[in-house]
Image: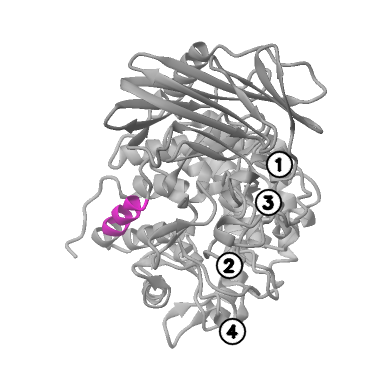
Amino acid sequence: MRIEDYALIGDMQTAALVGRNGSIDWLCLPRFDSPACFAALLDSPGAGRWLLAPAGAHDSTSRRYRDGTLILETTWDGAGGAVRVLDFMPPRDQAPDVVRIVEGVRGSVDMHMELMLRFDYGRDIPWLRHDHGQFVAVAGADAAWLHAPVPLHVDEDAHRTTASFTVRAGDRVPFVLTWKESWLPRPDPLDPPAALSDTERLWREWSARCDYRGEYERAVRSSLRTLKALTYAPTGGIVAAATTSLPEQLGGPRNWDYRYCWLRDASFSLQALMCAGYDAEARAWRDWLLRAAAGHPAALQIMYTIEGARRIPEWSPDWLAGYENSRPVRIGNAASTQLQLDVYGETLDCLHLARQSGLTIEEEAWDLQTALMNYLEGAWDQPDNGLWEMRGPRRHFVHSKILAWVAADRMLQAIDRHGLDGPADRWRALRRQIHHDVCTRGYDADRNTFTQYYGSTGLDAALLLIPRLGFLPPDDERVRGTIDAIRRELLHDGLVLRYQPQTDGVDGLPGGEGTFLACSFWLADALAMTGRRHQARQLFERLLTLRNDVGLLAEEYDVTHRRQVGNFPQAFSHVSIVNSAAALSGGQDDQA
């Protein structure tokens, strides 16, 4: 099944992927970064899934989210009848629940249900039994209960539970799967109609708070809902994606675990939330950032767990074949230990944006910002692994240097605009020094473009952010020249590659990858800022067509195979939809 064939449901603590065929092929319990109990996404049905569909049917006829909610409605419409399945995860109470309600729409339809729980990423096959009219699965620390009003059959040889039943117009048949630690008492049974009502009310009340009004409003609202679904409610952290190891190149090794929170995303995410009026979510994200970044400045990481913990060891479950045989599957992320100097600028830019936007900032936040800036003063001129988490040798990446300039600039703005205390003269001199260094060593005058790193001839799509970050004004010829060079050298069928992986073996990995969707949105932003709004709008609207039928985008797009690739759904892609829509909404198009 293609990546875009999945839809997302979740309860703001974890999320599941539901295929067009009615199969839940990915679910981690109880949190986004917990081991998966359904891992068919990365292997086969034997790694765990939950199928609920008409007997013998394949893909559904249609599907959609109920307006303003994350309640998925999937419909099969055939000659003998029509049936609809509602999939959702209600607000977390005692334990996480997945609710699936089969509704008869027309005629009669024979249904088939197959539940294959496989804890610990498909490795642990649970002991199955019946207990007081419900199905129970236990393996080690994990336990799950399935409630249903139809007979359930345990296939001990295949280690699965099945049901066959018929629904007619007006019938409702609910299934509820509940997880709990195996040593704790069984959770109280959930009332499916009440859970549906509560879930619908929660999402619609949240959606009603959106005050974005402008062009592309439907796309913006859909993307904001996805960001909310990827938010870990107890801490406010936003995971980069709900999945691990969906490949950037089909069959290749560029498969990473994105169930963590990246500092790189901080200011972009804050801007998206603030522009739509979601101040509470923006504040929670800001507070998560402050907690995660606290500690010795030299220990600042590029990513943290959803709780803000630092250790994210990387390992591979070698029993999983990988999505379409894309191996290795990776759990954890070794890039968490890399040196990426850009995160200092991104963190300080985010906190500056929060202060500028009117979010209350405690005095301790300025102490943290000052400590980070003081460390960066002595470290900015070192080589690092760069924004894209290069697993090759460290280099003097131009984007990292520009973000060091951003750090100094935002600190100076805080002093000038908010009267905060700091060594303004010293930081002003540092800002000038970094700017001169980048413009001297990171700029190719012969080609009129900035380069990926000092001494390189390669390009980097992150350079599209130069005018947005304020490093140079949009009308500077070097800005326009860099944009044009990226369009010449990094476009693949009109979409943007992050960089050319083959250039100097820069990332230390074999093979290539798809076009990076966030970078393509950055190109649209850069075109708009440099007076080419018509071209920007054309690109943005093309990118919107790459979303699947329920509005979701992965990290990348494979233009050769015409399909989404990379982890899914990707927060960075959806943040970019919101921010680019806001930038393009209104205003006068050029005549180009």
Query: Disc 2 to disc 4, how far (Cα)?
Result: 29 Å
The residue mark sitting in front, 3 or 4, is 3
**Label 1 is placed on what type of residue?**
Pro
Mark 4 and mark 1 lie on one chain; the one further toward the N terminus is: 1
Mark 3 and mark 4 lie on one chain; the one further toward the N terminus is: 3
Decide if residue 484 is on the left or right side of residue 388: left
Query: Disc 1 to disc 2, how far (Cα)?
Result: 23 Å
Residue 539 in the magenta stretch? The answer is yes
Mark 1 and mark 2 lie on one chain; the one further toward the N terminus is: 1
Q: Which mark is residue 303?
A: 3
With respect to residue 148, does 573 lie above or below? Answer: below
Mark 3 and mark 1 lie on one chain; the one further toward the N terminus is: 1
Residue placed at 41% from the left, 61% from the top?
520
Task: Name the residue beneath numbered marker 1.
Answer: 35
With respect to residue 374, does 156 lie above or below? Answer: above
SS of the residue at dot 2?
A: loop
Task: Name the residue beneath numbered marker 4.
Answer: 455
With respect to residue 109, does 461 lie above or below? Answer: below
Q: Is residue 347 something one can see in this rendering?
A: no
Q: Main secondary structure of the magenta part?
A: helix
The residue mark sitting in front, 4 or 1, is 1
SS of the residue at dot 4?
A: loop
**Label 2 is placed on what type of residue?**
Gly
Q: Residue 139, percent across and down?
A: 78, 33
Front-most of residues 411 and 512: 512
Query: Disc 3 to disc 1, how far (Cα)?
Result: 19 Å
Q: Which mark is residue 252?
A: 2
**Label 3 is placed on what type of residue?**
Met
Query: Disc 4 to disc 1, how far (Cα)?
Result: 43 Å
Which span of residues is magenta-colored?
537-546
Decide if residue 5 is on the left or right side of residue 409: left
